[in-house]
Structure formats: C-alpha cells, structure tokens
Amino acid sequence: MSREKIKVPGNVYEELVALEREIHFTLDTQDTVRRAEDRGYMAAANWIRQNENAYKVGFSWGFEPEAEEPHSTIRDVPERTEPVQRRTVSHPPTLQASRPQPQPGRSPQRKSSSGSGSGNGIIAGIKNWINKYF
C-alpha cells in the first residue's frame, strides 16, 4: 500500500480541516464523531462514521479533496456592462412667491407671519416679531 492521502468529498475535507484546527482529533472515532457533531460538522461526522478505516489511515497520512478545485480564485467574472440610466423626476418650474396683500383693518407695518419674510434676513424677522407682539 502506498502512502497516499485519503480522498474525501470537498465539503467533508473543509469540515475535517476546520475540525482539526479546533480540536486535536484522535484515532478514537466515536470521540471524534461526537466532537464533530457538537461543533456542527455533520458531513464530517457522517463520513467518519461510514468510513472508520479510511479515517484511521487519513489520520496518519492526511486527507485531500476528491475534486481538484482551485481555492480562493476568481471564477467567471462577468463582462462589464454599461450602467443602467435611471429616470429622474422632473420638478415643475418654481413659482415666484407673491407677497401677501395687506388685509383691511391692519396697518401695513404689521405682518401676520412670524417668519423672517421672503429673503429679508434675520434682522427683518426680528423686526416682524417685535411688530407682531409689541
């Protein structure tokens, strides 16, 4: 018998490697199966349970995945396409703010709004507030 690594399915190999990093598994297959199940490595636990002799050989000589899949490589990068042009909402033209007409019975100095007026600044707003309340 030659010293070759035991070939296992890809998902089992990944779980065996992760299990080996977390625990130092032993030749006691029942203990290793229990620890694999405790950590959620069900594929590895089932494979060890079904292939005890292969596990014992792989424990000494190592494991390798069955399919030679390249790990951590870019696969099938899609071709670059032009970005989709998005529609924008057209806003209606802004209406010019009309100044309110003075109401009958009120003096033109007093304004009913407490705001700063139409673009007259902070000082105009303060004057409007003073005229309104004093």
Image (cartoon, rainbow, N blue to C red):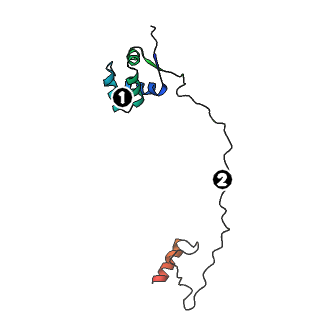
Depth order, front residue of 65/126: 65
Is residue 62 positioned above or below 132 on the image?
above
Residue farthest toward the top in the current orientation of the protein: 1
Depth order, front residue of 92/73: 73
- Report helix, strand or loop for mark 2: loop
Depth order, front residue of 66/83: 66
Q: CA distance from mark 2 to mark 1?
A: 51 Å
Horizontal and vertical percent position of residue 134:
45, 84
Type of residue at label 2?
Arg
Horizontal and vertical percent position of residue 28:
31, 20
Horizontal and vertical percent position of residue 122:
52, 71
Q: Is residue 16 left or right of residue 97?
A: left
Image quadrant holding the N terminus, namely top left
- Mark 2, residue position: 86
Q: How many marks?
A: 2
Report if residue 122 is visible in the image: yes
| Residue drawn at point x = 52 percent, y = 73 percent | 123
Horizontal and vertical percent position of residue 64:
47, 19
Type of residue at label 1?
Ala
Q: Is residue 22 left or right of residue 112?
A: left
| Residue drawn at point x = 63 percent, y = 78 percent | 98
- Report helix, strand or loop for mark 1: helix
Within the image, what quadrant is residue 121 found in? Answer: bottom right
Mark 2 vs mark 1: which is more N-terminal? 1
Q: Which mark is residue 36?
A: 1
